[in-house]
Amino acid sequence: MSGTTGSDLQLAIVGSGIAGCAAADFARQQFTNIEIDVFEQQSRIGGRIRETAFASDTFETGATAFHDESRYMMKYVDRFNLELANPVKPRQKPTNAPMMGLSFGIWDGQRFLAKMSGALRDRLTILRKYGLSFPRLWWQSRRVFKQFNSLYDVLEAGGSFKSPDEMLARVDLYDTAQQSAMEHLREHAVSQACIHQVLDPISRTLYGQDARMSAVVDLYMFKAIASNSWYSIRERNSLLLDHLLDAASATIHMETKITAIDANTGSYTLTAAEPPTEYGPYDAVIIATPLEKTDIELNGGAPPVSSDREYQSMYINLVNGVLDPTYFELGAQDDLPDAISTTTDVDESFTSIVTLVRENGGTNIYHVTATSIVPNDLFLEVFSSIEDIERFSWEAYPVYEPPLLWPPFQLDHGIYYTNAMESAISSMETEVMGSRNVVNLLSRRLREG
Ligand SMILES: Cc1cc2nc3c(=O)[nH]c(=O)nc-3n(C[C@H](O)[C@H](O)[C@H](O)COP(=O)(O)OP(=O)(O)OC[C@H]3O[C@@H](n4cnc5c(N)ncnc54)[C@H](O)[C@@H]3O)c2cc1C
């Protein structure tokens, strides 16, 4: 190996989001004598995991929640002794209860079409309204979820995949991934009403998209959300990343934007701008950020990445105020559901409004999502009073309308790419799966020479 410091393996990781931090940790566990450098262009760790101080509290304004069947996330929680919290009303309930019993309302701009909660009465209403379509939707989402999760055993046994489509083919989900959820569900006799009124609003809330999304992403997330057991990490989700980097004993180069990776016979050097600095040589490099959203030149070896995925913009708004029940044709605050998701009929405005904290000294705290900037006028219509608003925008996740593009997990002999995984599903848990896969690929290359 090319190491100059006595280590057998020199590894560079570009990006300190969950994919980069998990890759550092997996690499530390996998290889005995390794040195790991992590490069992060910003002045904070976390990437799309980000917390924000607002109204004398702290809220997640990027990735918020994971479900209790997220095998890696739940293992990290145990391993680092992290405290779980209900992502909704986190400060109100000082328990480690998940997001159970949340009431959900589907709003079409005129009225609430459906209400969903764990209550038997609501379940019976849904069954009456959508007949067998609802159990069929549930059954399809369960199948996708189960098949996708069978990847854990392959990855934990050291198995690796060259690209996400190979991964999906292995668990018999390739064809489903290349079909939209709408097409897939129609083939399985799910009614258009059920797709439009139940699945679309959930897809809009989670991904700012609708049932034209790939059936794998949409149905996996539907099953996850319907399981109703969601958590955040109490203090902040990014605390997990601090633990992963500590466990990896990685050297972290903050505010260091990598602009080029050069291949020189068997090793790699990285160039950072401002001030121009060269790092390396490294035996391997893991790129842990979407290449579409950064401008890293790959010189001398790595072919250009054959992917130009479009990313979905998401606008997150924290509002300290009071939602107006009359806007929703309701009489009182208590009639409002905890979470309001909208159908595609409500195109111009918001995709969801979730009440995070009730009665924060007379006002509530809401998390409002949209796929475009929410105009002030709309806020004034929907809320009867507003104390404060904080706005964030993200290039959040790929647009999942098939046909999907599948960048490879390995770009060159020694350059790996965790964010190829986002073509299958983008979430904290699945990014960790992508990291496990690239560390397995690296391990296999070192074994096989
Ligand atoms: C608004 C929003 C809500 C979401 N909600 C959820 C949710 O509730 N649950 C869930 O599981 N997932 C959610 N997600 C998805 C989840 O956030 C992502 O899938 C995941 O965090 C991506 O992690 P990553 O490490 O792959 O990439 P990123 O988090 O994007 O990390 C990439 C890092 O690389 C750095 N970087 C980029 N270029 C360079 C360079 N040239 N040099 C050095 N550093 C560089 C970036 O600054 C960044 O820190 C949400 C995403 C968004 C935006």
Image (tube, grey):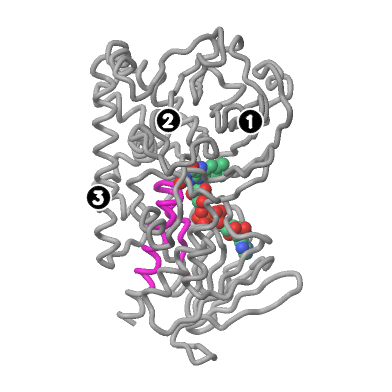
Look at the image and give the residue range highlighted in magenta.
Answer: 415-442
Label 1's element? strand
* Quadrant, the N terminus: bottom left
Q: Earlier in the sequence, mark 2 or mark 3?
A: 3
Q: Is mark 2 within 8 Å of ligand 1?
A: no
Which amino acid lies under the numbered mark 2 shown in the image of this protein?
Answer: Arg
Q: Is residue 311 visible to the viewer in this orientation of the structure?
A: no
Q: Earlier in the sequence, mark 3 or mark 1?
A: 3
Q: Which residue is mark 2?
A: 212
Residue 167 in the image: above or below residue 342: below
Label 3's element? loop
Q: Position of residue 319 (x, y in %)?
A: 66, 30
Q: Position of residue 357 (x, y in %)?
A: 57, 32
Label 2's element? loop
How far is mark 3 from mark 1, CA to CA?
Answer: 47 Å
Residue at image location 24% in from the left, 47% down from the top: 172
Residue 100 in the image: above or below residue 113: below
Which amino acid lies under the numbered mark 3 shown in the image of this protein?
Answer: Val
- The mark found on residue 360 in the picture is 1
Q: Earlier in the sequence, mark 2 or mark 1?
A: 2
Residue at image location 32% in from the left, 46% down from the top: 69
- Residue 130 quadrant: top left
Q: Is residue 204 visible to the viewer in this orientation of the structure?
A: yes
- The mark found on residue 171 in the picture is 3
